[in-house]
Image (cartoon, grey):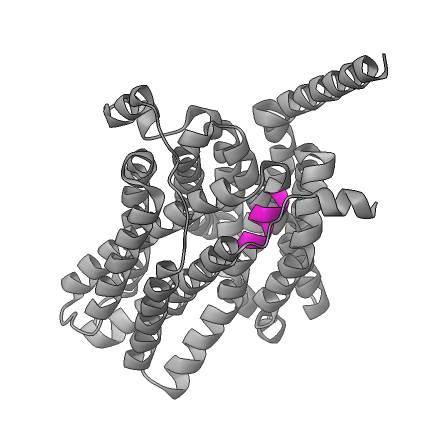
Amino acid sequence: MIEMEMAKPKLWTKNFILISLVNLNLGLNYFLLMIIVSEYAMIKFKVLPSQGGLATGIFIFGALFARLFTGKYIGWLGQKRLLYGGLILSFVTTSFYFLANSFYLLLAVRFLHGMSFGSVSTSAGTIVANIVPRERCGEGIGYYGLSVTIASAIGPFLGMLLSMHGSYTTIFAACTVAAVLNLIITLFLSVKDVKLTAKQLSELKSFKLNNFIEPKAVPISFFCMLIFFCYSSVLSFLSAYAKEINLMDAASFFFIIFSVVIFLSRPVVGRLFDSKGENVIMYSAIAVMAIGLIVFSQAYYGFMLLAAAVFIGLGYGAIQSSGQAIAVKATEKHRMGLATSTFFMLGDIGMGTGPYVFGTAISLVGYRGMYTGVAIIMLGCLFLYYVLWGKNASRSREMNREKEHQSLKKEAV
C-alpha cells in the first residue's frame, strides 16, 4: 500500500499551488463585486432593480464572449500569455470601477471585467488540466476547485461586511489588491505551452465551429449546464424563499454549510473518481442533489433547510468538479483549452438563464412548487447522464479492464 502511494505522481507542485492561488483571488474579486453591484447601481445611479440586475448579469455575457475566443486561441498564443493578458485586463477593469461615473459606463466596465474573468478562468483551468497527472485528474481538479469554494464562502461574507461597515470604494480597493496579487503570483508561474504541430496550428487558426467548441466535451458539458441551471434556482431565490417561509436565520448559514460540505468532501470525491470511475460519483451525486432539493422545497424548520444545504452541497460539488475532469479527459492534450472553455461556456448559459426561467415559474406555482419542479428535473438528470455519458463510460471502463486482464495474462506467460 505504501509503495502504491509512493508511486503516485506528484500533485502539489509549485505550479499547482500558484495557479490555485490565482483562481482563489479571481474568485474573491468576482464574489466581492457580485454581491453588491446591483445595490451599488441602484443607489449610486438611481436606476430600477431590473437595471441593477442587468449590471450584475452583463458580467456573465462578457465572460461567455471571452471564453468563446480564449478556447480557440490558447493553443496558438500560449496558455501563460493569455492568462497574463487576462490578468492585466482584470486589473485595469477593476480599477475602472472607481472612475465609472454613469450607469452605462458601469455596464461597459462590467462587460469588460467579465471578459477578463472568462479569459483568466479558462486559461487557468487549461493550465491545471495540463499540469495535473492524468491518473490523478479527478483528485487534482477537485482540489483546484476548492479555491472557488473558499472564495464563494469568503467573498459574499466580506462583501456584505464591507458594504455595512465600510464603503463601496473599500470593496473596489480590495478587488484591485486581489488583481495586483494575481499579477505578482503569475510572475513565479513556470509552465510550458503545449507544442502544436503545423497541422494542428493551421486547424486552430481556421474559423470552424470545432475551433470554438470541443465536440468531445459537449455531452458532459450540456449535462452540467442543466445541473447549473437547477442550482441557479437556489443561488438566486434563497433569500426571497427564506423570507416567505420565515427561515431567514437558518438561511444566513446556508452557503457556509454548503461550502464546508464541498470543502470536506472534495478530496474524497476526487480519489473515488480516479479509482472507481466517474459513474460511481455522478449517479450518486445526482441522486443526493435531488434529495437535497426535495428537502429544500418542503422545508418548514431551520434544520430542514440546513440539511438541504448538506445534500445540495455534496451533490453539486461532486458534479461540478467531476464534470470538468470528464471534459478534459475526453479530449486530446492540445485541445484541452477548448474543452475547458466549452465546459465553462455551457455552465454559464445554465447559470445565466436559470434565474429568469425560475422567476417566471415562481409567479405561476410559487416557491415550493418551483423547487419541487427543480427536484423532478434533477431526478430526470439520472437518465440524461446515462444517455449522454454514463453508458459509454461503463463500456470504456470494461474495455480498459479487459485490456489490463489480457496484459497481465501475457506477462504471466
Q: Is residue 99 left or right of residue 307?
A: left
| 244 and 133: which is toward the camera | 133
Q: Quadrant of residue 169?
A: bottom left
Query: Furthest-bottom residue in view?
Result: 165
| 113 and 136: which is toward the camera | 136
Magenta run includes residue 169: no
Q: Tell me what residue is drawn at x 59 percent, y 62 percent.
A: 259
Q: Position of residue 250 (x, y in %)?
A: 63, 72
Q: Tell me what residue is drawn at x 48 percent, y 28 percent.
A: 331
Q: Tell me what residue is drawn at x 63 percent, y 55 percent.
A: 313
Split into 4 quadrants, where in the image is the C terminus?
Answer: top right
Q: Tell me what residue is drawn at x 47 percent, y 62 percent.
A: 21
Name the main secondary structure of what is drawn in magenta: helix
Magenta run includes residue 142: yes
- Residue bounds of the magenta highlight: 138-144
Q: Position of residue 33 (x, y in %)?
A: 35, 67
Split into 4 quadrants, where in the image is the N terminus?
Answer: top right
Q: Position of residue 149 (x, y in %)?
A: 54, 60
Q: Position of residue 11 (x, y in %)?
A: 60, 50
